[in-house]
Image: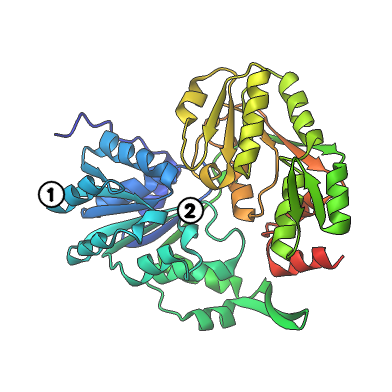
Amino acid sequence: MAGPVQRVKLYGFQQDALEATKNYNKVAYYLDMGLGKTFVGAEKAVALDKDILVVCQLTKVDDWYQHFKLHYGLEVYNLIKQKELESFFESASRKVGVINYDLIYRRQALLAINSTAYTLMLDESSLIQNENAKRSRFILNKLSPENMILLSGTPTGGKYERLWSQLHLLGWKISKELYWRQYVEVEYIDVQGFPIKTVVGYKNVDRLKRKMREYGCFFLKTDSVFELPEQLWNDIMIEPSQHYKVFRKRNLVAVEGKELIGDNLLVKLLYQRQLCGVYSKEKLGAFRDLLESTDDKLVVFYNFNEEAERLAEICRECERKVFQLNGTVKQTEDFNREDNGIILVQYQAGAMGVNLQSANKIIYFTPTLSSELYEQSKKRIHRIGQSRTCYYYKLVCRNSIEPKIYEVLDQRRDYTENLFLNAFFDN
């Protein structure tokens, strides 16, 4: 039995997005982070008047479940749970099913939905940009929805070569090879005797954007809608540890009873990042100093589980209440209710689609390698509803890999792109 419905009140720009796409049954709402893609996507899905299958990140499953329950009163099923998956198909009513990306291809029973007309909605649709990933192959090749809704604030991270899979879902039947020939500039760079294809630019961009609009893409940036508070950045430079210096010179170091051996490029990269983070007493000390300098709420981004353990320990020693957002724990609501809490956010779990604007300060303990996650992370506090200046503190080991990572991220590129990875290790 559906509970009382609290209908959504849309902003004018959200209504404009729906009006501009009212004649499309396949659409992409590329609304900047914080502009309410959830509300626009849900309204469009309901208006299409079919069963709805929502695919999202694991941390967003409950959010989508509650959104449809609260605002539309539809039958909603959490398809992560086997019993609810069975009930979803047994129900003859109009309904919504919600599942996460990393489980969808394992739920082969979902293919039965193809026997009906339904709407497929992909939240953070950039997560299918690698069409060879299992989740992407399942969505691209095995699902056949009548209607399609894509939602993303960073559909490409500035990289048009990553758009093809999303445009394919919208019905543009251009082949990937032809798409690259028409819109992507490439060069082949010799790396240790192997030719590596590298994107160096784009062409026919205006034509590409026109084609995207023809296939139901709607773009909107925050700056054209709201005047958000100022963003102020502070780089806190820290001396690298002696362990880091030894590892850079020898590709081998013993630290905390562990022997770190950099026997290939990726392992070398991993250990250098850890030596600038969890194994850096200097950086952990700088983090403690920051905590002791303020009673304000703080959002802290990190990469590795060991980092979270050390950071949580420091928070407790400083008598600060600590909350977690990672692959298994989501304490965002508790954090938002707390006056001066600290939430430790693992990039993969919390850089996208999470509202943390009850705080106005972010600490980057270590940098991600993903441009998209970095850009998304900034918007967790700088979004609609934020009235205060937003402060960002980067803890950076000088003369280390970290300034190089941030330099590449500021160019909106992933650090792991071959060009940058090899350029660094060749120095």
The answer, for residue 299, to whether it is visible in the render is yes
- In depth, the one of 79 and 70 nearer the eye is 79
Residue identifier under label 2 = 152
Residue shown at 68% from the left, 57% from the top = 412
- In depth, the one of 116 and 401 nearer the eye is 401
- In depth, the one of 217 and 284 nearer the eye is 284
**Relative image position of residue 379 (x, y in whole percent):** 59, 41
**Relative image position of residue 120 (x, y in whole percent):** 31, 58
Which element carries disc 2, helix, strand or loop?
Answer: loop
**Relative image position of residue 195 (x, y in whole percent):** 71, 83
- In depth, the one of 191 and 124 nearer the eye is 191
Above or below residue 353? Residue 138 is below
Residue 26 falls left or right of residue 94: right
Q: Amino acid at mark 2?
A: Ser
Residue identifier under label 1 = 91
Q: Which mark's residue is nearer the viewer, 2 or 1?
A: 1
Residue 218 falls left or right of residue 264: left
Which element carries disc 1, helix, strand or loop?
Answer: loop
Q: Residues within 10 Å of mark 2 (few under 14, many from 20)?
A: many
The answer, for residue 360, to whether it is visible in the render is no
